[in-house]
Image (spheres, rainbow, N blue to C red):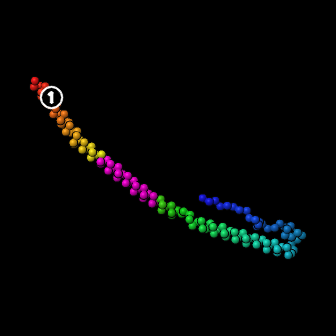
Amino acid sequence: MNRLKIVERETPLEAPSKDEANPNGTGGGGGGRMEDIVKRVERLESALTETRLELVKLSTRSESFVTKENLLSAKGELKDALQITQEAIIKKIDDRFKDIEEKARWKWGTVVIPLSVGIAGVLATLLVAHFSS
């Protein structure tokens, strides 16, 4: 994020000292006092122009600031996307377990049970042969 740069002004805005404004120290006016006021007004106008320029820059930058509404909208979109992704992952896991279950049933039905029946038949034949002799 850009930080604002604080710049010292070339022309100070403070009022001239009492001695500069009226070297006699009296309240009487003179041409010098009016010239000082005119100089101060010119400096103030210059400072005001600079301030306006800075304000325009800040206003332009502020148009791209993220608002609370933007953040809440993005948060909702992320929640929706996360929910969809989570559902897709759960569905894939369920499908994978179904595949494994089907393969296990196939093994039991086509391999294990017939093999067990065959072994039981061989054992029965051996037992019959052993006891009949």
Q: Which residues are magenta?
A: 76-99
Q: Is residue 28 left or right of residue 83?
A: right
Indicate whether 57 appears above or below 116: below
Q: Is residue 11 left or right of residue 130?
A: right
- Provide the residue designation for mark 1: 126
Q: Is residue 124 above or below residue 93?
A: above
Residue at 81% x, 72% y is 36
Q: Residue 56's quadrant in the figure?
A: bottom right
The residue located at (14%, 31%) in the rendering is 124
Magenta includes 95? yes
Query: Where's residue 45, x and y in %?
Result: 73, 72
Residue displayed at 51% across by 63% down: 70
Tell me the amino acid under the disc marked 1.
Leu
Residue 94, compared with residue 13, is above or below; it is: above
Q: Nearer the viewer, residue 74 or 28?
A: 74
Q: Position of residue 51 (x, y in %)?
A: 68, 68
Residue 21 in the figure: left or right of residue 103: right
Residue 34, given in percent of the width and then of the height, sits at 82, 75
